Image (spheres, helix red, strand yellow):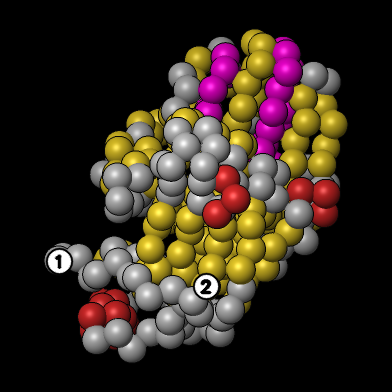
């Protein structure tokens, strides 16, 4: 039933802000349209410490931020300024190009606080790679929920469990957060070719096989999958239809052609992407 498991490796996103990266992995590049899967935190900040991910560009993908604890302030080249708090969804479609920053909110920088959450990249279908960039914020109250015995499931994006999230998506997919307060079980949607769970924490098993925290377990298609928890647990369930062809990834750029990647790199090197209003800093283009 479990076709593959993935372990995290640590990546520095700049300014000493580290995440545990599950995708892409050496043995698995994507799961459904999910290209990147990062687990940040849990981390504690002392007064004066902050997250400051300076303005940087994206193409060919959508970014999705979901927090368990803390807050981040999003700013982008379209002029959006949006605070995200636990349970909300920030969905940013990069399309042909967008620039954004992610920072600790100014009103929290002088207080002790935590930060914990998941950030993913969703690859866009080839027909939508050059779409106009956009940004939407969905407060947690607008996201559909399913109440399970001793657990709650919140659908972040896509369709599943008879629910549909309000987030605009570009291909068939599902993405959900499950928080269990005790022993429970739930099934994964059966209609998707590629399905997986990420165990954030807790006692979780599938088919009698334990899945240790901070592990992605991917499942064979067309096989019923029931996830069990032995107690309190936090799980992300995700997947969907495979991407329509190979994707090239270079730094923050995703595209179906290397030429588009090279073009975007040149654009950023020459500072021809639009800027983020009110910000003058930026992350320089790294060497390949």
Choose between 199 and 286: the one closer to the eye: 286
In the rendered image, residue 119, in percent from the top left (x then y), is placed at 50, 49
Query: Which portion, as a residue range, is magenta?
Result: 177-205
Can residue 86 be seen in this snapshot?
yes
Q: Is residue 12 left or right of residue 235?
A: left
Q: Which residue is disc 1 drawn over?
A: 287
In the rendered image, residue 40, in percent from the top left (x then y), is placed at 45, 40
Q: Relative to residue 17, is residue 168 depicted above or below? A: below
Residue drawn at x 43%, y 42% is 48
Choose between 243 and 39: the one closer to the eye: 39
Dot 1 falls on a residue whose secondary structure is loop
Residue drawn at x 55%, y 62% is 74
Residue drawn at x 41%, y 42% is 49
Q: Is residue 118 magenta?
A: no
Q: Relative to residue 54, is residue 143 depicted above or below? A: above
> Sequence order check: which comes first, mark 2 or mark 1?
2
For label 1, count other residues whose C-alpha is less than 10 Å away and answer few (under 14), some (14-19) or many (20+).
few
């Amino acid at each position: 039933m479990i076709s593959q498991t993935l372990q995290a490796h640590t990546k520095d996103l700049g300014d000493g802000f580290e995440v545990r990266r599950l995708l892409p992995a050496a043995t698995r590049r994507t799961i459904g349209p999910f290209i990147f899967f990062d687990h940040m935190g849990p981390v504690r900040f002392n007064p004066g410490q902050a997250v400051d991910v300076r303005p940087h560009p994206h193409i060919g993908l959508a970014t999705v931020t979901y927090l368990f604890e803390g807050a981040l302030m999003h700013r982008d080249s379209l002029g959006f300024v949006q605070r995200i708090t636990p349970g909300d969804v920030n969905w940013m479609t990069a399309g042909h190009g967008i620039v954004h920053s992610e920072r600790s909110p100014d009103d929290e920088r002088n207080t002790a606080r935590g930060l914990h959450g998941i950030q993913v990249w969703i690859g866009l279908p080839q027909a939508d790679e050059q779409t106009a960039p956009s940004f939407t914020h969905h407060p947690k109250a607008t996201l559909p929920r399913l109440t399970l015995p001793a657990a709650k499931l919140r659908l972040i994006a896509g369709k599943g469990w008879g629910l549909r999230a309000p987030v605009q998506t570009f291909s068939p997919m599902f993405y959900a957060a499950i928080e269990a307060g005790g022993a429970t079980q739930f099934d994964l949607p059966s209609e998707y070719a590629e399905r997986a769970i990420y165990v954030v924490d807790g006692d979780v098993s599938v088919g009698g096989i334990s899945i240790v925290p901070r592990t992605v377990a991917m499942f064979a298609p067309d096989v019923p999958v029931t996830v069990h928890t032995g107690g309190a647990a936090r799980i992300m369930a995700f997947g969907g239809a495979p991407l329509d062809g190979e994707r090239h990834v270079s730094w923050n750029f995703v595209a179906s052609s290397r030429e588009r990647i090279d073009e975007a790199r040149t654009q950023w090197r020459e500072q021809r992407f639009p800027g983020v209003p009110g910000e003058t800093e930026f992350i320089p283009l790294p060497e390949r």
